């Protein structure tokens, strides 16, 4: 087991509890400036797209094009056809595994 | 009390999808060498899907604990303003508010919205509880299933991470601005993969959110 796992699990848990609780515990209905809301709202798309890119093309410190890209293509079709997330994941894994076995 | 029940019931269709996400998280966390207990504990105390996937993905790709946690925190940053938006409805002691705030997830927040920026706390709590149970139970099922998997790349599980992130990303691409942030974030990360330590490209990609400063 990766020795960092428990550190990450504990720190992520604590940080999330604090982030979720901050507004309800500290603020009594005061709002945030719209520019802050716009910036924070874009963190999700920016980071998730970065995660898609690194987890499909990344391999240690190199960029590679392998069977995972085919799996991601299948996932994109699944998302476009509005399949449920679990089906999208299974589809991507299956396409990748089959391409690898060929 | 009845609003808690109505929220809990309204969340049932979403809970099916959330349980599916949970199963995926359990399987992927196992393949990222999380053991069997840590994924379940993580789902129980963090209760934030995309952040958990991100942390597991960073560790799986050889990143350190700090980069994994920073990536998760950045993905959860949206819960800051979301918490602020519902704060006026919260009542009781600080501990009670802190506890109830943990049931805020995207789904319960959306179901608790009553229009005009007003929220029903009971519905948030009810919907949050349904989603929470689905998430933790789904994770446990995934962990158990992960035991049967063996070598993850033989089953294409390494491609399940990007597929999962794509499924999480798609519903967030509602505006042109969000699409530009996504493209810029991906570009920053790809350029940095050969240059920076694992996990850092993802954190650097968060700079793309500054597009939001433009009016």
Image (cartoon, coloured by chain):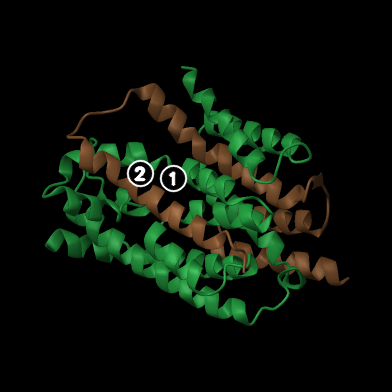
Image side of residue B142 versus residue B90, left or right: right
Q: Position of residue B187 (x, y in %)?
A: 70, 34
The residue where tag 2 is placed is A19
Of all chains, the one bearing label 2 is A
Image side of residue A81 versus residue B72, left or right: right
User: From where the camera sits, is residue A83 visible?
Assistant: no
The color chain B is rendered in: green
Identified at 70% across, 62% down, the residue is B158
Between the residue at mark 1 and the residue at mark 2, the CA separation in whole angstroms equals 7 Å
> Which element is circle 2 on?
helix
* Residue found at the far top of this picture: B215
Residue A99 or residue B201, whichever sits in front = B201
Image side of residue A77 versus residue B113, left or right: right
Identified at 54% across, 65% down, the residue is B25
Location of the C terminus of chain A (image quadrant): bottom right
Q: Position of residue B177 (x, y in %)?
A: 53, 28
């Amino acid at each position: 087991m990766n020795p960092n796992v428990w550190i990450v699990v504990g720190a992520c848990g604590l940080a999330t509890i604090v982030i979720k609780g901050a507004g309800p515990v500290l603020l009594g209905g005061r709002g945030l400036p719209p520019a802050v809301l716009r910036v924070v709202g874009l963190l999700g798309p920016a980071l998730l797209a970065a995660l898609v890119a690194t987890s499909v093309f990344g391999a240690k410190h190199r960029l590679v094009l392998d069977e995972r890209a085919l799996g991601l293509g299948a996932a994109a079709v699944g998302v476009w056809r509005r399949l449920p997330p679990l089906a999208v994941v299974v589809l991507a894994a299956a396409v990748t595994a089959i391409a690898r076995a060929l | 009390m009845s609003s808690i029940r109505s929220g809990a019931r309204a969340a049932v269709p979403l809970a099916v999808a959330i349980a599916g996400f949970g199963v995926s998280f359990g399987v992927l966390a196992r393949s990222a060498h999380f053991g069997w207990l840590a994924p379940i504990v993580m789902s129980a105390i963090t209760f934030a899907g995309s952040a958990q996937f991100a942390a597991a993905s960073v560790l799986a790709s050889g990143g350190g604990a700090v980069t994994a946690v920073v990536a998760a925190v950045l993905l959860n940053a949206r819960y800051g303003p979301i918490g602020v938006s519902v704060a006026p409805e919260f009542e009781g002691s600080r501990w009670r508010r802190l506890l109830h705030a943990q049931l805020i997830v995207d789904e319960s927040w959306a179901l608790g919205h009553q229009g005009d920026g007003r929220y029903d706390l009971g519905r948030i709590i009810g919907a949050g509880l349904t989603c929470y149970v689905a998430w933790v139970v789904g994770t446990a099922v995934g962990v158990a299933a992960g035991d049967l998997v063996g070598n993850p790349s033989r089953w294409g599980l390494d491609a399940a991470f990007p597929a999962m992130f794509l499924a999480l990303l798609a519903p967030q691409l509602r505006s042109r601005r969000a699409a530009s942030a996504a493209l810029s974030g991906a570009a920053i990360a790809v350029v940095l993969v050969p240059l920076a330590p694992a996990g850092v490209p993802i954190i650097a990609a968060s700079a793309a959110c500054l597009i939001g400063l433009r009016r």
